[in-house]
Amino acid sequence: MLTSKQRAALRGQANKMETILQIGKDGISENTINQVDDALTARELIKLRVLDNCPLTAREASDELCTALGCDGVQVIGSRFVLFRRNEEKAKYDEFLKK
């Protein structure tokens, strides 16, 4: 669980990031969960987008992925959302989590 200060620091980092995954008309499938899991392992902090034809809102998609993968939702704005999961082996964002 992230504190509000940690979440704010991660939001600042995510602001510069590009969206790397999109969730479309099929919603969240097993393949989507696997892709997000791999991306979180590699990057720790990722930005996703929910397309207009998706049956889920960005909040619903964020909550569903957080439950499935044990990650933290950093922010949801419009159709985009940011997820974070610390990688124990290659932690990139430890300096932001100490704040």
Image (cartoon, rainbow, N blue to C red):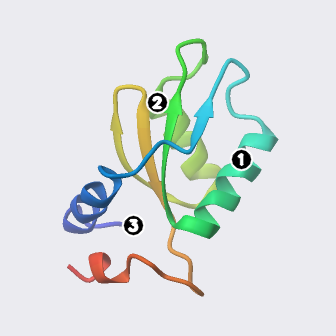
The residue labelled by disc 2 is 58
Of the residues shown, which amino acid type is indicated by label 3? Answer: Met
Q: CA distance from mark 1 to mark 2?
A: 15 Å
Camera-nearest label, 3 or 1: 1
Label located before the other in sequence (1 or 2): 1
Mark 1–mark 2 CB contact (< 8 Å): no
Q: Which residue is mark 3?
A: 1
Q: Earlier in the sequence, mark 3 or mark 1?
A: 3
| Label 2 CA crowd tier, 10 Å (few <14, some 14–19, many 20+) | many
Image quadrant of residue 96?
Answer: bottom left
Most distant residue in the right direction = 30
Residue 51 numbered mark, or none: none
Residue depicted at 28% across the width and 55% down the height: 11
Reading the image, the residue beneath label 1 is 33
Q: Residue at coordinates 30% horizontally, 60% vertically from top-left? A: 13
- Badge 3, how many Cα within 10 Å: few under 14, some, many 20+? few
Q: SS of the residue at dot 1?
A: helix
Alpha carbon separation for disc pair 3 and 1: 20 Å
Secondary element type, mark 2: helix
Residue 39 percent across, percent down from the top left: 63, 58
Front residue of 35/27: it is 35
Q: Using the image, determine if residue 70 lies above or below residue 47.
A: below
- N-terminal label among 2 and 3: 3
At label 2, the amino acid type is: Ala
